[in-house]
Image: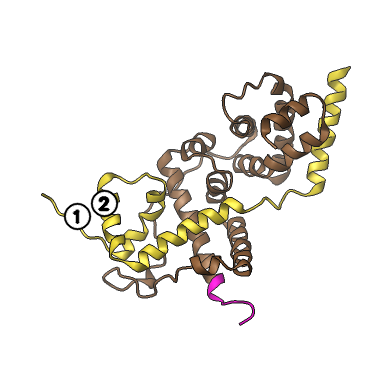
Chain colours: A yellow, B brown
């Protein structure tokens, strides 16, 4: 039976994003998980990537000025008027 | 409030419901449209046309997909028609998500990452990390920024992102990986600076 080929930390971090996407081949996933079991630093890296994804999920769009919303609401009102005539 | 509720109110002519829906999705929509067109001004026009198209079609929207997916598809279609950007060539050279300088010759960490889970439990540090994340996202190259925004900020699936941006899934994942890695690096740097009270 073929043994899981060991990968380095440098190779492991390159697999992390695809791992979180569930997009790794079975073989690569096993290699990475095998590596993570014995490597605290890469496990910390994986956790950091998870945190980043969580952080991105709570980034609220701040480039939406009140002015931009008001302009689109104007468009809405004009549309309503046109539709009712 | 659920999108469906807002939609019902909009159909009854409720402007506040429309403002809420705009507030919820306009930033993501703008980011997506901007991917295809050359200037912010053009993007604003396309975004406006998208909302008009949405209002026209809203009574026929059956909710088979989510409203967000439907909105983004309309936006992407209009942006494509308007966009003059040449078809993107996405570089697919090997990714190096962490600077090689942080590994030794055997590929093991010489400068390992410090876990920031504990730090993130702290509210102040969390706000700092969030601000760094927001800044990092804003500074990413356009394609990475668009992919990370649609996938991680807006929560679309990789497949949906690929379809909206006309990328292969593999290319989407490369861009996602690069973008996330860059954001991680910047947040790590920010948190390394220590606590503001130290």
Across and down, in percent, residue B136 comes to 58, 60
Q: Is residue B77 above or below residue A28?
A: above
Give the number of callouts: 2
Across and down, in percent, residue B42 comes to 71, 40
Q: CA gap, disc 1 to disc 2?
A: 7 Å
Circle 1/circle 2 CB separation < 8 Å: yes
Q: Is residue B118 above or below residue B88?
A: below
Instruction: Work out which quarter of the rendered image holds the N terminus of chain B and state it.
Output: top right
Residue B13: image quadrant is: top right
Of residues A32 and B99, which is closer to you in this image?
Answer: A32
Which stretch did the figure color magenta? B190-198
Q: Main secondary structure of the magenta part?
A: loop
The residue at the point 81 percent across, 48 percent down is: A66
Q: What residue occupies the far top of the structure in this picture?
A: A85
Q: Is residue B186 above or below residue B170?
A: below
Of residues B88 and B190, which is closer to you in this image?
Answer: B190
Question: Given the image, what chain letter belongs to the residue carrying mark 1?
Answer: A
Question: Given the image, what chain letter belongs to the residue carrying mark 2?
Answer: A
Disc ID at residue B61: none
Q: Is A65 on the left or on the right of B25, as rendered?
A: right
Q: Secondary structure at mark 1?
A: loop
Q: Is residue B83 above or below residue B124?
A: above
Check chain identity for marks 1 and 2: say if they share one: yes
- Whether the magenta-drawn stretch holds residue B195 is answered as yes
- The residue indicated by pointer 2 is A30
Disc ID at residue A4: 1
Residue A81: image quadrant is: top right
Residue B50: image quadrant is: top right
Q: What residue occupies the far bottom of the structure in this picture?
A: B198
């Amino acid at each position: 039976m073929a043994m899981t080929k060991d990968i380095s930390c440098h190779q492991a971090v390159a697999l992390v994003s695809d791992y979180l996407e569930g997009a790794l081949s079975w073989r690569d996933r096993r290699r990475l998980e095998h590596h993570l079991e014995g490597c605290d630093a890469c496990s910390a890296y994986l956790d950091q990537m998870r945190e980043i994804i969580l952080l991105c999920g709570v980034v609220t769009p701040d480039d939406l000025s009140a002015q931009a919303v008001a302009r689109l609401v104007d468009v809405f009102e004009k549309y309503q008027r046109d539709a009712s005539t | 409030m659920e999108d469906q509720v807002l939609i019902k109110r909009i159909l009854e002519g409720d402007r506040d419901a429309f403002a809420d829906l705009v507030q919820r999705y306009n930033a993501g929509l703008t980011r997506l449209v901007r991917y295809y067109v050359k200037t912010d001004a053009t993007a604003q026009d396309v975004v406006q046309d998208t909302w008009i198209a949405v209002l026209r079609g809203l009574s026929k929207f059956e909710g088979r997909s989510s409203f967000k997916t439907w909105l983004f598809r309309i936006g992407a279609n209009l942006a494509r028609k308007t966009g003059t950007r040449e078809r993107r060539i996405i570089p697919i050279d090997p990714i190096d998500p962490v600077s090689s300088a942080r590994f030794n010759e055997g590929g093991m960490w010489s400068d390992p990452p410090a876990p920031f889970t504990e730090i993130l439990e702290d509210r102040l540090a969390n706000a700092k990390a969030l601000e760094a994340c927001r800044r990092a996202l804003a500074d990413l190259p356009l394609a990475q920024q668009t992919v990370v925004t649609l996938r991680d900020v807006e929560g679309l699936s990789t497949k949906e992102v690929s379809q909206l941006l006309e990328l292969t899934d593999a290319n989407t994942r490369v861009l996602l990986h690069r973008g996330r890695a860059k954001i991680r690096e910047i947040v790590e740097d920010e948190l390394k600076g220590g606590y503001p009270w130290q």
